[in-house]
Amino acid sequence: MSSELTTEWKEIKWVLTDVDDTLTWQGELPPETLIALSQLQQAGINVVAVTGACAGWCDHIAQLWPINAVLGENGAFTLEKKNGAVHLSSQKPIDEIRQQQEQLKHQILEILQQYPSLSLTLDQPYRLCEVAIDIGQNRPPVNSEIVEEIIGKIRQLGAHATASSIHINAWYGEHSKKNTSLHFLQQRGLSHKAILEQVCYVGDSLNDQQMFETLPLTAGVANILHYWDRLEHKPSLIMTKSGGFGFAQFAQKLLRLKQEP
């Protein structure tokens, strides 16, 4: 799998990216990540974080990082900076989503009684719409078979569930990284053709597969190789570095390509 960008990438005007273990690495945010995000913005490229991270963390990202918007909790809401202020929006009323979240939380806690070593994430109180289980953030990584077993039980409830490198994220409703990303881009005037030609995605794990399937120009940071055999839809490129270092590598390659005559 190549790490080199082909000429089609010169048309990119939007970089959509996962956050955990794509912009971060081993629980930290490398300075190289922030520099890369800033350089992309300065070059006129729109940067949008598309993440399962909690609303509290997303607010921090939207307020302080050099990005244009955050699609948080796997697309449940959008935080966008306009004229120096961050605005929250969602396709479905937040109060309605929160009622569903409370119901799902009780159901998932019942499931977790069968797995006494597992618990909800420390950031659960700061989530607006989702329920998240810690499978590797503040504990040793959980066996993939157990992760898939829990996801199956959550889906039997009629809820959606995906696994990132650190969390199982679960929710009721039809939002997703893919659905909200496409809606966000269409609301900003991009046609289907423009989305396919001008938008790329960078990710690192199983919950990025829908984006890898949807967009022709996608990149994985090196740690995605951990999931390679389990990915039904793979990125078109893989960087040689992991996490935020891999994202910075990707950004430099993209910027150099766009500077070529």
Image (cartoon, rainbow, N blue to C red):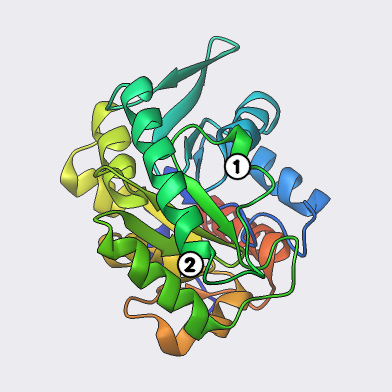
Q: Nearer the viewer, mark 1 or mark 2?
A: 1
Compared to residue 20, the image places residue 238 above or below, namely below
Q: Secondary structure at mark 1?
A: helix
**Quarter holding residue 212:** bottom left
Dot 2: element: strand
- Crowd class of label 1 (few under 14; some 14 to 19; many from 20; radius 10 Å): some
State the residue position of label 2. 219
Q: Is residue 248 left or right of residue 1?
A: right
- Asked whether the viewer can see residue 12, the reply is no
Q: Which mark is residue 56?
A: none
Q: Label 1 to label 2, Cα distance in Å?
A: 29 Å
Q: Mark 1 is on which residue type?
A: Gln
Q: Residue furthest left?
A: 192
Q: Residue 23 falls in which quadrant of the image? A: bottom right
Identify which residue is drawn at 29% across, 53% down. Answer: 159
Question: Viewer-proximal residue, 59 or 11?
Answer: 59
Q: Is residue 136 left or right of residue 15?
A: right
- In terms of image quadrants, where is residue 97? top left
